[in-house]
């Protein structure tokens, strides 16, 4: 005969299923928190390294952002190290904006074509091809840039062929599939009755596309373009292979220059940890990180605005 | 110009743009395959590389690529699966969940070179793992986690709520519902996501330059003891992958046939990714037919 105490214990004990439930919850929550920890660690580590240039090497933040001479190993006439990051910042922005300007009309035009004009051919040819090209590794784009784009630029404009123009061409082709497939998604999200209403009012197909569909899809299209820009800004190897890697202010589109990512990929391995040369590179990485946060913020703001409409 | 001619002109130019884009994309694919496929041979795919002479292969790099891919997927899949399950099945819709989602989104938008640099700082330098397969696998994991998590979450979303309610109504706990009912139904779509992300990982180079290293020491393919330094399975050896190899020989290489080797390697990468894509589509459809009554 069981005492009441034993009975109480038995009833209050967690069942096997309840234990399993707690186990599953804890396991999956741990995995999630691990990802969050990774994000925090990445930002924390890169930020602490990047700030060292300004705190322990006492470089002026403004000098860093506006200086035009990048030569961290050498000190200038005033005894200050030459760590002007402006050439790289300008290079990165120039290449990003130019490639986005070139890619946007092509990407949106193609997305409109495969969604509005010829959905059949779009689904059969364009969509699989763009999806496949999204997955092509960036080094392959870089290699093609090196063996096709650079010689072509050299033949057309003289000089070495390395520079902003070649970088823009490579990035244009690289972000084209991404922006196209995201734009197509944005267009697909426009309800069908918008088009029907417009056509029923007697609008031509182009008027419907231009005045109704594109307007309704604007937030999505902007997200696609900003996403492409973020990808272009952060791309390292493909750009590094065709940009020429000279840390100079770009004075023309065909002169060798550099971007934040190209200096990082070539420099980090050749400097000593903890030295000013190395810290300055980490500051560039921090700029890169902050810019990717900014792009993220812009995408968020566009998304919120899109929802409010 | 009246609206009808305007319409014709506009539609015509859209045809032009789309045609041009198709042309660019096909030319790109064609160039890779036409210049690369003639380089491919059994020797090229299996022989070790030569630093100064012609006729080297990419055998070691190819092995490294697959080994790193498998390790990275082994580490990232359970984490991504757990995170996706918590996010979709457990998490309440509050500020904390939103913050966590934002964090994952930030991780997915970080340039891969930044992820690689963090891997260098943390695993290579701080944890003294050196340039090794393990460091590389962790860096690839970070690179892969956000996208894989999102794709698994999307797969869970495709399973209808009726199935969840059914499981709970039968008296199963939430966890049992997830593992016994939801996951089997979501397997085809999860698998598709995993294979597609494998394609991305396979071609990644920027995150690996400073984590897995840029050298491919000779391997002894008869020694499968992971603790020997020349064993292919040793996770502590530096390992240059195929994608890194293309970058390396084009920016610093001195071998006379660098261009031929890069063309061949590019073709191998692209063909591998093509295969990943087809496999994802085919297996996804096949499994879906098998596992459901559809």
Image (cartoon, coloured by chain):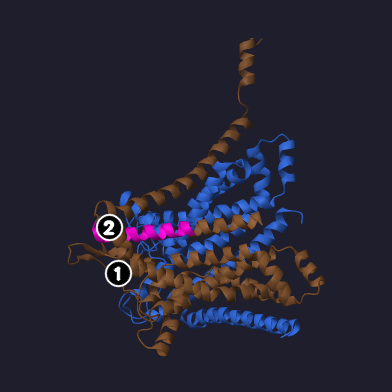
Chain colours: A brown, B blue
SS at mark 1 in the image: loop
> Which residue bears the numbered disc 1?
A68
Note whether residue B231 is visible.
Answer: no
In the displayed structure, A144 sits above or below A60; it is: below
Q: Residue at 56% across / 73% down in the picture?
A: A104
Crowding near pointer 1: few (<14 within 10 Å), some, many (20+)? some
Note whether residue B146 is visible.
Answer: yes
Q: Residue furthest front?
A: B1
Please state the horizontal and vertical placement of residue B263, each as a whole percent of the image: 45, 79
Q: Is residue A285 magenta?
A: yes
Q: Nearer the viewer, residue A274 or B142?
A: A274
Provide the residue span drawn in magenta. Answer: A275-294
Q: Quadrant of the N terminus of chain A?
A: top right
Tell me how far mark 2 sits from mark 1, CA to CA. 14 Å
Please state the horizontal and vertical placement of residue B195, each as a whole percent of the image: 57, 61
Q: Quadrant of the C terminus of chain A?
A: bottom right
Labels 2 and 1: the sequence-earlier one: 2
Q: Residue furthest right?
A: A200
Q: Nearer the viewer, residue A82 or B263?
A: A82
Please state the horizontal and vertical placement of residue B191, each as a whole percent of the image: 61, 57
Q: Is residue B91 magenta?
A: no
Q: Is residue B134 left or right of residue A21?
A: left
Residue B229: quadrant of the picture? bottom left
For mark 2, name the chain: A
For mark 1, name the chain: A
In the displayed structure, A2 sits above or below B268; it is: above
Residue A205: quadrant of the picture? bottom right
Report the predominant secondary structure element of the magenta stretch.
helix
> Which residue bears the numbered disc 2?
A60
Please state the horizontal and vertical placement of residue A255, each as a whole percent of the image: 35, 80
Query: Does label 1 lie on the same chain as label 2?
Result: yes
Q: Is residue B128 left or right of residue A3?
A: left
């Amino acid at each position: 005969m069981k005492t009441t105490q034993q009975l109480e214990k038995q009833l209050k004990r967690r069942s096997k299923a309840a234990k399993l439930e707690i186990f599953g919850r804890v396991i999956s929550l741990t995995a999630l928190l691990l990802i969050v920890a990774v994000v925090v660690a990445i930002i924390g580590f890169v930020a602490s390294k990047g700030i060292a240039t300004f705190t322990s090497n006492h470089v002026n933040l403004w000098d860093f952002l506006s200086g035009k001479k990048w030569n961290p190993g050498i000190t200038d006439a005033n005894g200050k190290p030459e760590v002007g990051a402006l050439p790289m910042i300008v290079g990165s922005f120039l290449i990003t904006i130019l490639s986005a300007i070139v890619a946007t009309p092509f990407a949106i035009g193609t997305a409109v074509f495969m969604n509005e004009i010829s959905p059949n051919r779009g689904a059969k040819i364009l969509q699989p091809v763009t999806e496949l090209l999204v997955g092509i590794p960036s080094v392959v784009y870089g290699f093609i840039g090196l063996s096709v784009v650079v010689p072509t630029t050299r033949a057309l404009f003289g000089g070495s062929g390395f520079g902003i123009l070649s970088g823009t061409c490579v990035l244009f082709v690289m972000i084209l599939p991404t922006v196209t497939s995201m734009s197509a998604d944005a267009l697909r999200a426009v309800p069908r009755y918008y088009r029907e209403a417009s056509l029923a009012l007697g609008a031509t197909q182009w008027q419907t596309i231009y005045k109704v569909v594109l307007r309704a899809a604007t937030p999505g299209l902007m997200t696609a373009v900003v996403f492409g820009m973020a990808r272009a800004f952060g791309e390292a190897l493909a750009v590094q292979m065709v940009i020429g890697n000279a840390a100079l202010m770009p004075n023309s589109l065909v002169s060798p220059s550099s971007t934040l990512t190209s200096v990082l990929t070539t420099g980090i391995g050749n400097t000593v940890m903890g030295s000013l040369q190395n810290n300055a590179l980490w500051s560039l990485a921090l700029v890169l990180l902050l810019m990717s946060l900014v792009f993220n913020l812009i995408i968020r703001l566009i998304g919120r605005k899109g929802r409010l409409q | 110009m009246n609206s009808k001619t305007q319409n014709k002109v506009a539609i015509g130019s859209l045809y032009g743009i789309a045609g041009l884009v198709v042309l660019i994309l096909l030319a790109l694919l064609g160039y890779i395959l036409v210049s690369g496929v003639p380089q491919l041979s059994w020797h090229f795919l299996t022989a070790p590389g030569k630093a100064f002479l012609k006729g080297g292969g990419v055998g070691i790099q190819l092995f490294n690529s697959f080994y790193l891919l498998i390790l990275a997927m082994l580490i990232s899949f359970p984490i991504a699966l757990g995170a996706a399950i918590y996010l979709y099945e457990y998490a309440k819709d509050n500020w904390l969940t939103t913050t966590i989602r934002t964090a994952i989104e930030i991780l997915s938008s970080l340039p891969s070179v930044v992820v690689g640099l963090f891997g260098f700082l943390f695993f290579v330098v701080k944890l003294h793992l050196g340039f090794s397969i393990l460091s590389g696998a962790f860096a690839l994991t970070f690179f892969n986690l956000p996208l894989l998590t999102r794709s698994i979450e999307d797969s869970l979303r495709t399973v209808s709520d009726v199935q969840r309610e059914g499981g709970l109504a039968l008296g199963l706990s939430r966890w049992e519902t997830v593992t016994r009912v939801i996951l089997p139904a979501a397997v085809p779509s999860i698998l598709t996501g995993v294979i597609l992300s494998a394609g991305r990982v396979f071609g990644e180079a920027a995150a690996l330059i400073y984590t897995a290293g840029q050298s491919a020491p000779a391997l002894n393919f008869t020694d499968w003891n992971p603790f020997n330094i020349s064993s292919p399975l040793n996770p502590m050896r530096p390992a240059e992958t195929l994608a890194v190899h293309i970058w390396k020989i084009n920016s610093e290489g001195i071998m006379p046939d660098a261009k031929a080797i890069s063309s061949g390697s590019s073709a191998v990468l692209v063909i591998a990714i093509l295969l990943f894509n087809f496999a994802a589509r085919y297996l996804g459809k096949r499994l879906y037919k098998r596992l459901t009554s559809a």
